[in-house]
Image (cartoon, rainbow, N blue to C red):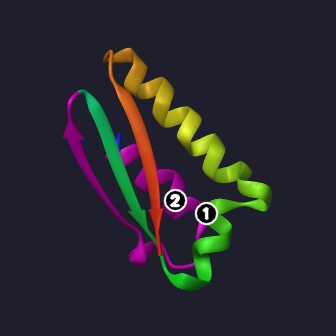
Amino acid sequence: MKELVAHISASLVDSPDQVQVSQSEVDGTITVELTVAQEDLGKVIGKQGRTAKAMRTLLSASAARDGKKSRLDILE
């Protein structure tokens, strides 16, 4: 799932080399933390959060296949 978020994010931003993704799992919930350059933050979030919501939906569907829950945190 970490690779999925990294691939989508790198495709959206102007500075793909500054995309950092970390993943941790606690009690069956996978938490993915995404960090991008400050000027690319708006591109990852999208208008009214639509891009972020779409990434969360894809992440949730991927986690559901494994019987787990997921969470995407976009950090500044």
Label for residue 9?
2
Number of marks in the rendered image: 2
Query: In the displayed image of the protein, which residue is found farthest to the bottom?
Result: 39
Name the residue that disc number 1 marks.
44
Range of residues picked out in magenta: 2-27
Is 73 included in the stretch rendered in magenta? no
**Residue 5 drawn in magenta:** yes
Kind of residue at badge 2: Ser
Estimate the x, y position of residue 37 in percent, counting from the top left. Answer: 49, 81
Element on which disc 2 rests: helix
Mark 2 or 1: the one toward you: 1
Q: Position of residue 36 (x, y in %)?
A: 47, 73
Looking at the image, residue 69 lies above or below residue 17: above
Question: Do tag 2 and tag 1 residues touch (Cβ < 8 Å)?
Answer: yes
Q: Position of residue 11 (x, y in %)?
A: 56, 60
Cα separation between marks 2 and 1: 7 Å
